[in-house]
Every structure is written in C-alpha cells, then in structure tokens.
C-alpha cells in the first residue's frame, strides 16, 4: 500500500519515462522542419496515451488504498480516468515544435518535455478528482505538493481540503504535484481558503491576479516563482 508521497514518486517515474521516450523520438527525427513536426504530431499522442494508462491505473490503485487506509464507510471501486485531449495535445506539440522553424532551433526539447510531462500526469489527477466526485464517502481532496514554487506551496498549505466538486487542480509547466482523496471517516484538515480556491481557477481577473501575486510574494517569499 503506497503512501501519498510514494504514489507521487511513482507518478514522477511514469512521466519521466514518457518524456524519455519522446526525447528519443525527437533525437531520431530528421528531414525538414515540417517533416519533423509531422512526426512529433503523429507520435507524441501515442506516447502520452501509452503512459497515461500507467498514471491513471496508479491513481486508481492509490485511491482504493486510501479508502482502505481511511476506512471509508461505503463500498466503492475507483476506475481509471483518461479524458480525450488529442486536439489540445496536438496544439501543444505544434507549439513545442515552433523553434524548428527558426535559424537557431533550440528549446524544442524543453517545450516538448513540459507538454509530455503535464499531459501524462493529468490522468492521475483526473482519476483522483473524478472518482472523488462519484464516491459517496469522499468529502474532497488534498494537494500533495513537491513544494517547489510559491503557488504549489500555497495551494497545499495547512493540508487544505478542497470540498467543492468543481475545484480545479491548478498546474504549471513541469508541475510535479499530485492529489489525495479525503473521506468522511477521516479526521481531515481545514477547508481550502477563499484565496486557495481563487488561485485554483483557470481564469482570473487582473485584480485577482494582482491580489494573488501580492499574497504569494508576502507569505511565500522563501519559494521561487
């Protein structure tokens, strides 16, 4: 039975293998920029799909383990969740390929690694959050942070529990955070604050963005970002 930290570490291994496989494809790509981009557009979704099975299965197993560990009262079996993001992924790969069309085509590797890492990790988070909404014993989820930046540290602070079923799992480039379900049988932590919920939104007004930046700089000055 993996702990939340151990499961997050296993997810890092899965996403790392996905990035490694994609970098191998990129190293073997040849021909014109158009030909190299076409190869990446065709092959990258297949790589992400392959490793997404691993990340979603890892999350489903972890979810069931957490139900047992927290003695969730009602029976429920988690199912892996992989959403169809083919078109969004292809747009992201096209963005990652842009440096191929410049006189100094550097940066493709880092861009592509960012895309593949995030997209391979996404099914893990989607599996936790989707099953949390379906499970009658679940009350919310907590962020398991790597603590690498101001935003991630703030979103995970106080062991905050996100009980709103519409709460989004906010990410950034190369984000290595994961999620952990929380059940009614558990002595869980505090509800996420208004600032944590606001910071989780995909879109924020300029005023909200400024307030968030000021909050992060004031309270998490020891962290980068």
Image (spheres, rainbow, N blue to C red):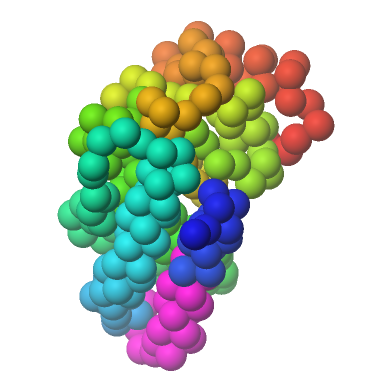
Residue 99 at what x, y percent from top left? 47, 65
Answer whether residue 28 is magenta in the image. Answer: yes
Identify whether 126 is placed above or below 29: above
Quadrant showing the C terminus: top right
Identify whether 208 is placed above or below 30: above
Residue farthest along the right direction in this orientation: 222
Span of residues in magenta? 15-34
- Residue 57 as seen in the image, left or right of residue 66: left
Residue positioned 46% across, 69% down in the render: 14
Residue 41 figure quarter = bottom left
Residue 42 figure quarter = bottom left
Residue positioned 54% across, 49% down in the render: 4
Whether residue 37 appears in this view of the structure is no
Answer whether residue 177 is magenta in the image. Answer: no
Residue 70 figure quarter = top left
Question: Foreground residue, 131 or 151?
Answer: 131
Question: Foreground residue, 9 or 220?
Answer: 9
Residue 107 at what x, y percent from top left? 55, 65
Residue positioned 68% across, 44% down in the render: 148
Identify whether 27 is placed above or below 106: below
Residue 101 at what x, y percent from top left? 41, 69
Q: Main secondary structure of the magenta part?
A: helix
């Amino acid at each position: 039975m993996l702990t939340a930290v151990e499961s997050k570490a296993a997810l890092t291994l899965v996403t790392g293998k996905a990035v490694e496989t994609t970098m191998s494809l990129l190293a073997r790509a040849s021909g014109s920029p158009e030909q190299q981009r076409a190869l990446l557009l065709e092959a990258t979704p297949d790589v992400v799909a392959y490793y997404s099975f691993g990340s979603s299965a890892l999350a489903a197993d972890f979810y069931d383990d957490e139900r047992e560990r927290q003695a969730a009262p009602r029976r429920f079996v988690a199912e892996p969740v992989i959403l169809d993001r083919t078109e969004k992924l292809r747009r992201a790969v096209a963005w990652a390929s842009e440096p191929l069309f410049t006189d100094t085509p550097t940066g493709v590797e880092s861009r592509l690694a960012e895309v593949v890492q995030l997209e391979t990790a996404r099914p893990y988070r989607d599996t936790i959050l989707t099953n949390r909404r379906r499970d009658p014993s679940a009350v919310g989820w907590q962020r398991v942070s790597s603590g690498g930046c101001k935003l991630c540290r703030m979103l995970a602070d106080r062991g905050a529990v996100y009980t709103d079923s519409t709460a989004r799992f906010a990410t950034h480039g190369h984000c290595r955070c994961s999620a952990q379900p929380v059940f009614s049988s558990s002595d869980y932590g505090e509800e996420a604050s208004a600032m944590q919920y606001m910071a989780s939104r995909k879109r924020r007004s300029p005023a909200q963005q400024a307030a968030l930046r000021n909050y992060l700089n004031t309270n998490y000055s020891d962290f980068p970002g």
